[in-house]
Amino acid sequence: MVRGLDKFREHFRDYSGRYVLIGGAACDLLMEEAGLEFRATKDLDIVLCVEALDASFVKAFWDFVSSGRYQAQQCAMGLRRYYRFMKPEDSQYPFMLELFARKPDMLVLTEGAHLTPIP
């Protein structure tokens, strides 16, 4: 299981309809349910369901990032926006979060937040 996935699930238990896990973490969950092994992955790839986003989810997301004390916070701009949060100081949190959103204005930054561009 991906490190920190349980922490993520618990934190977002009231928001399950607002995001979808994709990639290695999603495959890991499906393979585990089937009783099969899967390659290790360190990150959570998250697609936001824009139609279901609201202020309470956005606040919960930034609270999660803040609580994990992620050292590297990055963003790529364009028609779609990609966010990456890496190296949490709290080892109970996922090593990396990668967030994908079709509407770039939906995830408003908290005051004092600084994102480094993704090269």
Image (tube, helix red, strand yellow):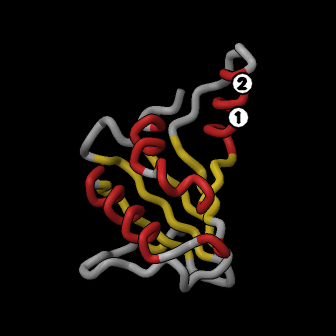
Marks 1/2: CA–CA distance: 6 Å
Say which of 27 and 12 sits in front. 12
Where is 93 relative to 103, above or below? above
Q: Position of residue 107 (x, y in %)?
A: 49, 77
Element marked by disc 1: helix
* Residue that numbered label 1 is attached to: 27
Q: Position of residue 65 (x, y in %)?
A: 35, 58
- Does 16 sit left or right of 24 as displayed? left
Q: Quadrant of residue 74?
A: bottom left
Where is 24 relative to 104, above or below? above
* Residue that numbered label 2 is attached to: 31
The image shows a total of numbered marks equal to 2
Q: Residue at x 38, y 62 (%)?
A: 60
Element marked by disc 2: helix
Within 10 Å of disc 2 (Cα), the crowding (few <14, some 14-19, many 20+) is: some
Q: Residue at x 40, y 48 (%)?
A: 11
> Could you tell me the amino acid type at mark 2?
Met
Q: Position of residue 99 (x, y in %)?
A: 56, 61
> Could you tell me the amino acid type at mark 1?
Cys
Q: Quadrant of the C terminus?
A: bottom right
Q: Residue at x 60, y 51 (%)?
A: 45
Q: Quadrant of residue 103?
A: bottom right
Residue at the far front in the pictured view: 14
Q: Residue at x 48, y 54 (%)?
A: 14
CB contact under 8 Å: marks 1 and 2 = yes
Say which of 31 and 91 sits in front. 31
- Does 100 sit left or right of 5 as displayed? right
Within 10 Å of disc 1 (Cα), the crowding (few <14, some 14-19, many 20+) is: some
Disc number for residue 82: none
